[in-house]
Image: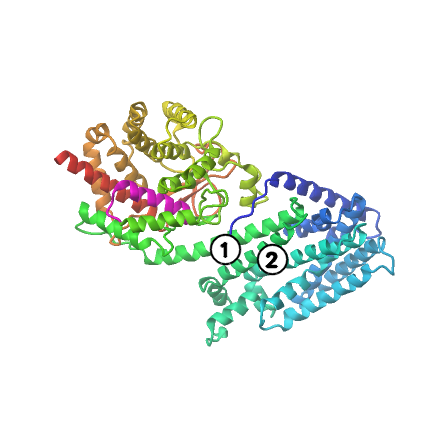
Amino acid sequence: MLLKTNLNYKKINIYKEELEFDMKLSLSKYFENSNYTSDIIDEILDKEFISSNPSYYLYYPYLFNEYFDIHDKKTLDLISISGFLYYKSVILIDDIFDNKDSKNNFNKFFIANICQEETVKIISSFFKIDSSFWDTWNIRKFEYAKAYKMDKTMKNIKSYDEFEKLADYKSAFGKIGIDCLFHLSTNKDKAVYNDVLNSHKLFYTSFQITDDIADYMEDVENDQFNISKHELIKVLGDENIDNYSIKEQNKLMYFKGIASELYSKAIAYTDKAISIMNLGNYSKETLWKNELYSLHNTCISNFLNITGFVETYKVKNKLSNKIQVNNNLKDSIDRSIKYIIDSQDKQGSWNDIFNEAGVSNVWATSYIGYLLSESNVNISNKLLKKASNYLIQNKNSDALWGYNNMWIDDADSSSFALLNIKSDVNINIYFNNWLKFQKKDGGFSTYKDENILLSSLNSSKIKNVKGWTQSHFCVSSVSYLVFVELELTNSDSFKFLRSYLISKLKSYSNIISYWWAGEIYAIHYILLGAVKNKDTELVSICEIIVNKLVKKNEVNYFFKGLMLHTLCLTDNLFIKHNSKVIEIAEQIINKQYTDGSWEEGFSLKIPHPSVIDVNNKDIAWTKDSKGTNIMVSDYNRLFTTASCLTALKKYEERRQQYNN
């Protein structure tokens, strides 16, 4: 299950915005010369109704026109108007049936009746009374009637074929637009028509699943069939579902894993629909495919958020909050090693950090895996190999890595993955793909393509992602380390990157990390690479900056660990700040929890994709896991624990070196 991306995303969405604007205008003009009062027209064209429903209902036939090739814009606009009016009538009638005691039902029925009359008027202007279109029209009417009956009488299903039929019948109004296009087309290709209808059915089956998850309580209260309840009853087995309130049932749906399983099914349906529309002559990116991608990505996002929410809830309930007493350096290292070993899952991944993209498994595994392998801690090669294998098995189609195994690739996740699999036979292929993240200024961006990123974020509210596609100092710092570890420092790309970093370092104000709340993060990885590369100039520049940063009283243990580790990287820093080194080490040892972890910190920043300068004082950073311009914690404490563990290990080595 991977996000679907569209290289024409921006172009298609500009076209969608133009269509939306044009159709709102066409709707207004259509009713300008009618005999309806302004009150009735206002109700039909209710702005709140339009804004609260998907915009494509304003131009539904346009989604499919590229498969039927109707050239006349006036025809398409009129069919679109009829589609919108019919959709509105269906929603109003559904509302009447669901809220039978509403005092406003007569007015709703009156408006619905007008909408249906206008729909028939428009369509009648295209099809004569003896047209075969009207046979299809009658089929759709009966499908809608069957859908209502099934919704009210179904208690369970024997197979998902029945549920697919329900979803297909419910979307009968949408199929009328496709029917119109087919009957108006000069080349009535039945195979194309059937493929579009089949993909439409799969789309709405997926849509219905997501709708049932979101509307569990409302559907149960209205005595409608809900696939989530059906699955919950199966999971509960002999236990009576009526023992739980509707609110409790809704919670059980999430915590019993039903919602995540259903989203997996929804994703499978969109996958199948996309596969149909990618066959044969359908390779062109169309409006319809764009909607299929969008629903697919919405399902993945919901899946990631639900599974992430459940996981964070479970993890937080098992974490220790008791400080380990009588702790010492050796025991502290051993406990933290055990914590990290016990936290690795069966597949070989470490999971940590939860935000809108879900929980990280790939980036977290690559980050923690590299820290462990680089620090010579007493962890078996088998465990590290398991992590490396997980990374190799979970690379994206372009042989790179993302935040998790469903997200698009990014430079930072790929950097740490490359650091884990240096000896892999395909390392040169991975490296050359990774190089594409380098920008014209020599730095590395987190994401490289605006269209791919925008289609992955899948939000109509996000139009500018230049902040996420510019060069990032923190990402570039790890990129430097990649060149060093892969022994590719003679390349022009490396020299270009090195120049970028030096220019940033020399202007001290430019060393702010885009993604991290502490300046020490980027400096640590540059210095680590410079020491390994024996780059005395870069080492000297970094030491000057560390001499300034060490004066700050860092309370976040992720950054405290990075600072201790950094001070132990060179003789100059270790000797000059020896008392500070000992102080930080003791603070870390004395604040370890009994399970071997350290307190999670809000270390990671998620700026809005449009933000260029994260140091902008107008940005109000909030501690959260949702949205942007937020600071996110490592809920599983793995980033913090790995940081503290590797720092203590380096400190132990330094102590032994100087004691000897």
Note whether 365 is above or below 584 in the view shown.
below
| Residue 549 position in % (x across, y down) | 30, 31
Dominant SS in magenta: helix
Q: Is residue 377 magenta?
A: yes
Tag shown at residue 532: none
- Of 547 and 384, the residue lying toward us: 384
Residue with the mark numbered 1: 303
Real-space Cα distance between discs 2 and 1?
A: 14 Å
> Left or right: where does residue 250 sit relative to residue 384?
right
Tell me, yes or no, whether the highlighted magenta stretch contains residue 290.
Answer: no
Q: Position of residue 74 (x, y in %)?
A: 80, 45
* Residue type at tag 1: Phe
Nearer the N terminus, badge 2 or badge 1?
2
Q: Secondary structure at mark 2?
A: helix
Residue at the disc numbered 2: 207
Q: Left or right? Give the position of 167 relative to 625.
A: right
Q: Residue furthest left?
A: 660
Q: Tell me if mark 2 has few (under 14), some (14-19) or many (20+) residues whose alpha carbon lies within 10 angstroms of its own.
A: many
Residue 650 x, y percent position in the rendering: 23, 39
* 582 relative to 253, above or below: above
Using residue 231 as the reference point, say whether residue 168 is left or right of it: right
Q: Is residue 301 left or right of residue 126?
A: left
Extent of the magenta region: 360-379
Res 552 quadrant in image: top left
Query: Considering depth in this image, is 461 or 571 the residue closer to the camera?
Result: 571
**Could you say whether the residue bearing mark 1 is in a helix, strand or loop?**
helix
> Badge 1, how many Cα within 10 Å: few under 14, some, many 20+?
many
- Relative height, residue 74 to residue 100 (above, below): above
Q: Position of residue 512 (x, y in %)?
A: 39, 31
Amino acid beneath label 2: Phe
Residue 40 visible (yes or no): no
The answer to whether any part of residue 575 appears in the image is yes
